[in-house]
Amino acid sequence: DIQMTQSPSSVSASVGDRVTITCQASQGISSWLAWYQQKPGKAPKLLIYAASSLQSGVPSRFSGSGSGTDFTLTISSLQPEDFATYYCQQANSFPLTFGGGTKVEIK
Amino acid sequence: QVQLQESGPGLVKPSQTLSLTCTVSGGSISSGDYYWSWIRQPPGKGLEWIGYIYYSGSTYYNPSLKSRVTISVDTSKNQFSLKLSSVTAADTAVYYCARGVRIAASPGDWFDPWGQGTLVTVSS
C-alpha cells in the first residue's frame, strides 16, 4: 500500500494568513493526488484533483502543486470558513489511501 | 446534481454483519462513467477506503478488509450496498458512500460527491 504522510498534523493561523500543507507519498504517484476539506460532522469535500486542478465551485484561494512524491495544498488568504481538517488522497494505485489529516485552527 | 444517502442500522452486535445501503439520486448508477465506493472514518480518526463497485457488478476491495467485505449493486433501485461480516468494536465508524471519478488515464478515483455519512456502532 502507498502511505500518505501529511504535515503538519495541525496548524494555527489567522484570517488572511497564507497556509501551506504538505503531503508525501511513500512512492511516486505521478500527479494522481486529491485534496479534501472536512468540517466537523460533515462529509469530506473535494477541493483539488490531479494534484493541481481546482474542482468546480471551489474558491481560487485554494491551489495545489507537486508531482511524484511531494505535494502541497496552499490557501492563499485564509477565510473564516476555511477552518477545517484537510486530507490528501492518492489515486495512483489500489488500495486508495488517505493522509492522516491536517487540522487548520484559529490562532 | 447527484446526491448520495446512506441508510442502515446504527448499532450492530459484535460478530454480526453490518449492512448499509447507499441510494443515489439525480443521476444513474448505470451511466457507466463512475465507480461507487464505500469509505469509513472511526471517531476522531482518518479515512479508510473500503472498496468500490462498478454498475456491471465488478468490484475491488481493500485487501485489509477483503475477507469480510461484500459490495453489491441494484441498478433498478439506483442503489449499492455494503456488507461487513464478523464485526468488532474496531469497525465502529462513520460510513460514507461516495462517487468515484476518474479522468482520462487516471488509474484510480477521487471522490465527489459524498453522502452525509452514517455512524455505525459495534456494541453488545
Image (cartoon, rainbow, N blue to C red):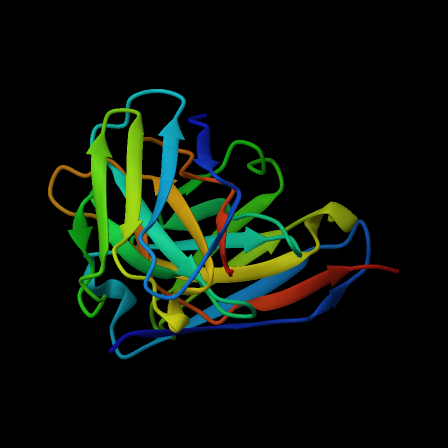
B121 to the left or right of A50: right
Residue A57, position as x, y percentages in the image: 20, 70
Question: In this view of the protein, can residue B109 be seen by the observer?
Answer: no
Tell me which residue sits at (19%, 39%) in the image: B106
Residue at 64% in and 66% down: B119
Q: Position of residue B22 (x, y in %)?
A: 46, 68
Q: Answer above or below: position of A47 versus B63.
A: below
Residue B116 in sight from this viewpoint: yes
Question: Is B70 drawn above or below residue A96 in the view shown?
Answer: below
Q: Nearer the viewer, residue A44 or A40?
A: A40
State the residue at coordinates (27%, 79%).
B26
Can you name the residue that lies furthest to the top here? A27
Furthest toward the left, the residue is: B104
**Residue B33 image offset from top left, x and y in percent:** 19, 57
Instruction: In the rendered view, tell whether residue B74 sits above or below residue B110.
Output: below
- Does A38 sit above or below residue A29? below
